[in-house]
Amino acid sequence: MEKRLKAWGSNRAGQLGDGTWTDFRTTASTVLGLTSAEVVKIAAGGDGATKSHGLALLTDRTIQSWGSNDAGQLGDGSVFSHNAPGQVVNLSNATDIAAGGTHSLALLADQTVVAWGKNKQGQLGNGTNADSSVPLRVEGLNQVIAIAAGLHHSLALREDGTVWAWGHNDAGQLGDGTTDNRNVPAPVVNLTGASRIAAGGKHSIALIGPVGGDGTAVKAWGANASGQLGDGTLENRHRPVDTALGTGVITLIAAGGNHSLAVTGSDHRLHTWGHNGSGQLGDGTTDNRNKPVPVPGLIGITLVAGGREHTAVLFSDDTVCSWGHNGSGQLGNGTTADSSTPVTGLTALTGVDKLAAGGDFTIAN
């Protein structure tokens, strides 16, 4: 049987892509029309159970989208939500994707970026604040190698190791030393040598140094009321600061709504910090942490994804585990009970090598 893209959790906007409007699913459902073989990358966005969307980059470099579309975040030229994948218009040369709260980004083969969806805070980066239901070029960006989308802000990593940001900046999430929104990209100050980026609800993080090399570190900026910057304080930061993770071998970073994640060491162990009201840090408590803490017993992690209030990880044996908020079944374990420790999804998933967590749902391929 041909392997298919899977999704679980909230479906109130059709974000599971299974052709239904069923409120939620507590075990994995099949996304319609997409075989695993043709999906290169996946992304999950949203700011809650009723406003979430999914993206899939295909082998032909086109993008499929599904779910909430009130601001045009599906990029199909309309503002109508749909519960099955449809094609983003005017795109045939994409190499990467990112899904924000109500906007979407694509990195193109020429290393420029396009964006679509909500633009009230300038998160599309095209010099206006008008929403767009079709992809528009982000101004002034080239030589981009990675992109990330937060709730209402966007990030781009350039070949030279600098990070550029645009959109909402009320908590300093753009890292430019101000709290002024920007509708065109500006460089994050005092930041060089970045190799990976991630965007949370209102915070941003970057891996500094070669991926997996000894001496790498994580820097963070933006909102910090829950400790999501990991610097031992609860103060918002308008410029990058060092996390208390220190330096070492760091291979992966990710950001959820108000929490942050990093995979470290030769045994690929997970550290988490920030908001923990639903147990999304996985340390067996619901206590917020303003410094990174290890998730007990978890090693061999190959992928990590942060949702609004939940976390999902992939292990080297293809097992998917998750924890945190589960009111819509986004943990995939057949219940709607939150968990502050890792739980395994009930549906057997084989050959998984891609994972994404959105508002209140999860996608695996």
Image: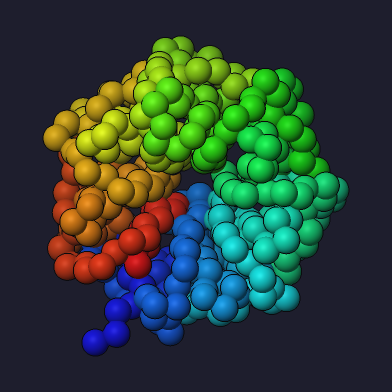
Q: Dividing the picture into quarters, in which one does residue 70 lie?
A: bottom right
Which color mode does the image show? rainbow
Find residue 13 and report its horizontal and vertical position in percent: 48, 67
What residue appears at the point 76 percent right and 50 percent down from the top-left corner? 142
Find residue 294 and report its horizontal and vertical position in percent: 25, 27
Q: Residue furthest top?
A: 233
In which quadrant will I find the N terminus? bottom left
What residue appears at the point 18 percent right and 67 percent down from the top-left corner? 347
Q: Is residue 109 left or right of residue 316?
A: right
How many marks on residues? 0
Q: Residue furthest right?
A: 127
Q: Dividing the picture into quarters, in which one does residue 153 lie?
A: top right
Q: Residue furthest bottom?
A: 1
Q: Dividing the picture into quarters, in which one does residue 230 lie?
A: top left
Considering only vertical position in the picture, is 67 above or below 338? below
Considering only vertical position in the picture, is 278 above or below 45? above
What residue appears at the point 52 percent right and 40 percent down from the top-left corner? 196
Does residue 60 show up? yes
Find residue 330 and report its horizontal and vertical position in percent: 30, 56
